[in-house]
Amino acid sequence: MSIIKLDNIVKKFYIGEPNELEILHGISLEVEEGEFVSIVGPSGSGKSTLMNMIGVLDRPTSGEYILDGINVGEADDSELSEIRNQKIGFVFQTYNLIPKTNALKNIELPMLYAGIERSKRIKRARELLDLVEMGDRDKHLPEELSGGQKQRVAIARAMANDPAIILADEPTGALDSKTGRLVMDLFHKLNKEKNKTIVLITHSIELASETDRIISIRDGNIIDVTDNTKNRDENIKKNSQFNTNNTEGGNE
Ligand SMILES: Nc1ncnc2c1ncn2[C@@H]1O[C@H](COP(=O)(O)OP(=O)(O)O)[C@@H](O)[C@H]1O
Ligand SMILES: [Mg+2]
């Protein structure tokens, strides 16, 4: 079953009358439950705009989006934020953790919004910290963590409400290759062991080669879709070996 089904999605931005800028020109895309896909393309090609559509952070100008069987176009804003909170975990290049708030509380936040009681929140947040191997950093503030550690906390937070989908917009973009490797391994683990559907936006051809399907975007259009399921596991192995041997530039 397709958990994400975009049909002819157009996104225009109004940049003051009478100008409008069409950024996505009619994107159609389906992602299966449990699939790990990557989106690649040059800067400015519309990747983040597309991610905002998929994550219902913003609405398309036209076109239809069915998310896990729900027609998103028919939902009002409060329904949309509930859909986001329940179904989607976001991971960003710049982590977007709440400053002056420790790792554990950052992870609790999406559960707080979901109305989960405190003791359950804390228990789940601790389990998630363990899952990302950050169990001993619960009291640390974001500013006291390295980039890779911040991203692991952000991934734990993305998992808080056990979403079906993880959307990651250049999650390794600010990390050195060794740390990026750890983050990528975490995504593989969530995909394989927790059956999360993952959409990864990346500039790295190497990381894209570790996903089931590579979707190439240029100037607001999908220009190529490559089925990569046969090569995926071998590429993971190859890239892991390379990065284990290469310890240069690690900051952890
Ligand atoms: N809110 C906005 N208003 C006007 N233009 C925007 C807005 N958001 C993005 N754009 C434009 O859309 C294009 C695609 O941006 P983006 O989706 O961020 O690309 P990518 O993530 O591939 O680098 C860019 O030209 C950008 O300037
Ligand atoms: Mg972007």
Image (cartoon, rainbow, N blue to C red):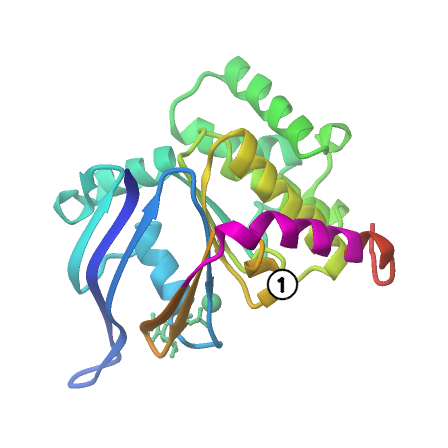
- Where's the N terminus, which quadrant? top left
- Give the extent of the magenta segment: 226-242
The single residue placed furthest to the bottom in the displayed view is: 18
Horizontal side of residue 26 vs 175, given as left or right: left
Residue type for callout 1:
Glu
Judging from the image, what secondary structure is the residue with disc 1 in? helix
Residue 217: percent from left, percent from top: 39, 71
The single residue placed furthest to the front in the displayed view is: 230
User: Where on the picture, by quarter, is residue 197?
Assistant: top left
Depth order, front residue of 218/162:
218
The single residue placed furthest to the left in the displayed view is: 74
User: Where on the picture, by quarter, is residue 81?
Assistant: top left
With respect to residue 121, does 20 lie above or below? below
Horizontal side of residue 102 vs 231, given as left or right: right
Q: Which residue is mark 1?
A: 206
Membership of 229 in magenta stretch? yes
Residue 148: percent from left, percent from top: 71, 50
Membership of 55 in magenta stretch? no
Q: Is residue 101 visible?
A: yes
With respect to residue 7, does 155 lie above or below? above
Horizontal side of residue 213 vs 107, given as left or right: left
Query: In the image, ligand 1 is in what quadrant?
Result: bottom left
Please name the residue shown 69% across and 55% down the image: 180
